[in-house]
Amino acid sequence: MNKSREATKESVVGKLGCFVFAVSLLASTVSAGTEAPVGLALEIDNGKGVPLKVKADQAFYINQIDIRAHLKATRDEGIAGLSKRGMFANLPWTGANMEQEFVDQPNPDGSYTRRRFYSGAEWMRQPASFTVTPVDAKGKAVAPAVTVDVGLVKGAPNRETMFINRFRAIQWVSDCKSMSDCNKARKFEEEALIELRNSRHPEQTLRLPAGTAALQLRWSLRPSVTYAIPVQLVDKPEFSYGYKIAIEALTPPGADGSYAPGTAITFQLSQLDGTGKRLHPAGSLPTYNDFRAGRAPAGLQYYRGFDEPAAAWYRRKHRERMLMAQIIGPADALQPIRSLVQLEDFLGKNVTQNVGKPERDGLYAEFQLFPPSNDLFGGAFDPRHTGWAAPVSDKFTFHVPDNARPGTYLVTVKGRRVYLGEDIPGSQTIEILVGTTQRGEPRLTVTNCANCHKDGGELATLLHGNGNLAACNACHSPLSFEPDNEAYVRIHFIHSRSERFSAPLNQCSACHRDGASIQRTSKAACLSCHRSYPASHVQKFGPVRSIYVGGGNESFDRCGESCHTTHKGSGL
């Protein structure tokens, strides 16, 4: 009996000792920094790493890699120069597919820009890897390396570190005489791009100990070459990692909690870090000049398209980084918007853009950019850029029309923050009631998204960090100067070209909810997915001019009630 008690006592003491040891180990781990790992964004341009500042004693995982090589040419050689010079030289370039698109808006001198997008070259199809190693000033490893496996691995998707693996080449020519004549052009640029985003394995962490001077990157397709990304460790940064957006309605609703049609409603946005600390003073945001000059230390982002042109699917939409707000509703009447926004609207006096008209589109939608579009885009056309120096408010006002239908309306703000190596999106949506006290449920035309968008590809973590599909169409309405902006155009275009989308392209039921959701026939709806149409259609509607929507502004018009009321193989 005594031996039993002694054994029990030893057991308890032993367990207590283990518990004390575990607590002490936990305490030491906490003191060494136990924040959740942060996704790190790496960039290499023409073989040179873009320097990084990162928080010291922080765990990271590789969440984004952008690599670009580019060169100038005076003659049309396609992308042959890339195969001979630079980071992508001597790789297997055979098998590349090409799509061509002109930029609709002319250049200031009246010339036009043509873009040729290349994908599917042999090196782009090969599974590969990037190895990232922390090194000191002499290039000696100071911590274990992390390997990022990329490329679509058939039958073994868990081997892919990134949900988005895009390998591209683009030829630009910026002095075409017209949108059909580049014969005398002499201003060519060739670029190759690698875009890797949204880690599927954030548990593969990386620490940068004291003495880390750079991250050394090695690409398995060019194993003899290393690329150095200079690193500076910051001991006590002013802000924390993370990004949150909050929205507050400043205009109070009526006594019943709803707003009457015809009401102008003012809102205020707040941008916060992961701990809830404000990233800007209440009432104001950085000016666009401050942003461009790097005087926005909290990492808040604005539109970068003037310096970083983007193209859906093919080129760096994640680096466009627009900050904007929208309202759309009623939620139970959601559908594609047909009303076009012209460039003149962006340059006019209106601070907001009314893009959804109940009498035409069946719903109301309005959006605002920050800075407002007339300052942002007007400043680009003004040699003095006075709009870029204008103060930017964090308040915005939407104007609910008198004929707005009763229902639930969604107000969304989306933005992006780039801070100490972290490049992440954020969004927030709130609901308001207009003309009713009864909340309505969103009526979506698509479903099943989560079947594919998982394991790092969740909609809540992708481009805008917005998992609410009901809160998209106002921002993604038709723009005459950016035809691929329309929501369904972009979705069709990306999914029709993505190797991740495995369903037959004519099987609309893979995404669409019911037959009614595919009845709004237009050039844009069809030719954002199909790459051509029959000769009879060419004769009647004109040739396919745009890889995104087929033609020009007419592409968003409804073709008619009797055309394409069914879709062969749709499953609906």
Image (cartoon, rainbow, N blue to C red):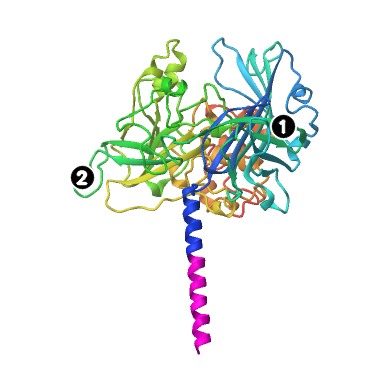
Label 1 Cα crowd, 10 Å radius (few <14 / some 14-19 / many 20+) = some
Residue at 24% over, 48% down:
257
Q: Amino acid at mark 2?
A: Gly
Residue 163 lies in quadrant: top right
Label 2 Cα crowd, 10 Å radius (few <14 / some 14-19 / many 20+) = few
Residue with the most extreme left position: 255
Residue 189 rendering spot, x and y as whole percentages: 68, 19
Nearer to us of marks 1 and 2 is 1
Any magenta on residue 4? yes
At mark 2, the secondary structure is loop
Q: What count of labels does the image hold?
A: 2
The answer to which of marks 1 and 2 sits earlier in the sequence is: 1
Residue at 42% over, 43% down:
274
Q: From where the camera sits, is residue 569 visible?
A: yes
Q: From where the camera sits, is residue 401 visible?
A: no
104 left or right of 531 in image: left
Which region shows up in magenta?
1-19
Residue at 54% over, 34% down:
318
At mark 1, the secondary structure is strand
Q: Which residue is mark 2?
A: 254
Residue 218 rendering spot, x and y as whole percentages: 71, 36
Question: Toward the viewer: 307 or 361?
Answer: 307
Q: Quadrant of the C terminus?
A: bottom right
Question: Toward the viewer: 10 or 191?
Answer: 10
Question: Toward the viewer: 283 or 492?
Answer: 283
Q: CA distance from mark 1 to mark 2?
A: 64 Å
Residue 353 lies in quadrant: top left
Q: Amino acid at mark 1?
A: Thr
Q: Which residue is mark 1?
A: 226
